Image: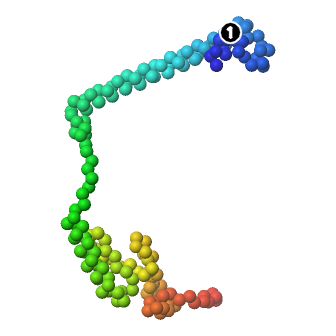
Amino acid sequence: MLNRLKNPSIINVQESSENLLSDEQKNKRQEIIERDKKHKDKIDLYTNELVKAMEGTKQFDEEYKKTGHSDQFKDLKYVEREEDLELKAMFDSEQDKFNKLSENMEGKVDGELDMDLHGNITFRPPGVQRGEPVAEEKETGITESGTYILRDGKLVKGKAEIREQA
């Protein structure tokens, strides 16, 4: 764009109809160039201020190096984690005990027993896979007024017809 303003020979057809070499047009172009120069100077001023501020951050880096805190991270080495054979043997023995417990409970419990790594035993209803959240059971018992039915040994709210208002 700056080239276009300085060299009037690079102009589209519509502008060629005007007298671009007149003093008035030259003055307009010169004003635009001056405004652009002022804008550039402002940007340069802000850039210089930013560079000065960045120079200040170098002092932080130098102070950090002087403290020696950066040296403690130079020789970090990562190691493979070794498997603790004693701990694994303990877990396997607990797992065997759990499997025997499950065999002993077969037919007595409607569902499955699970044991986590800490040895905590939990009950899982039949059909629920390991890790799935257990679906909440329907509320049983009398919770409000109305008709109730005994279904599968549980008291559940019945669905009765509603009478018309008088």
Classify 10 Å Cα crowding around label 1: few (below 14), some (14-19), many (20 and above).
some
Applied colour scheme: rainbow
Q: Is residue 45 left or right of residue 56?
A: right
| Vertical side of 112 occupied by 61: above or below | above
Q: Is residue 151 left or right of residue 10?
A: left
| Vertical side of 31 occupied by 87: above or below | below
View extreme (right): residue: 17
Q: Position of residue 59 (x, y in %)?
A: 29, 26
- Report the residue at 22% width, 30% height from top: 66
Q: Position of residue 148 (x, y in %)?
A: 49, 91
Q: Position of residue 166 (x, y in %)?
A: 64, 89
Would you name the residue on which mark 1 appears? 26
Q: Is residue 59 left or right of residue 111?
A: left
View extreme (top): residue: 23
Residue 58 placement: quadrant: top left
Q: Position of residue 63 (x, y in %)?
A: 25, 29
Amino acid bearing label 1: Lys
Asked if residue 29 shows in the view, the reply is no
Quadrant of the rendering where the N terminus is positioned: top right
- Report the residue at 70% width, 12% height from top: 8
| Vertical side of 2 occupied by 113: above or below | below
- Report the residue at 46% width, 81% height from top: 138
Q: Secondary structure at mark 1?
A: helix
- Report the residue at 37% width, 80% height from top: 112
| Vertical side of 64 occupied by 49: above or below | above
Asked if residue 113 shows in the view, the reply is yes
Which residue is nearer to you in this view: 28 or 102?
Answer: 102
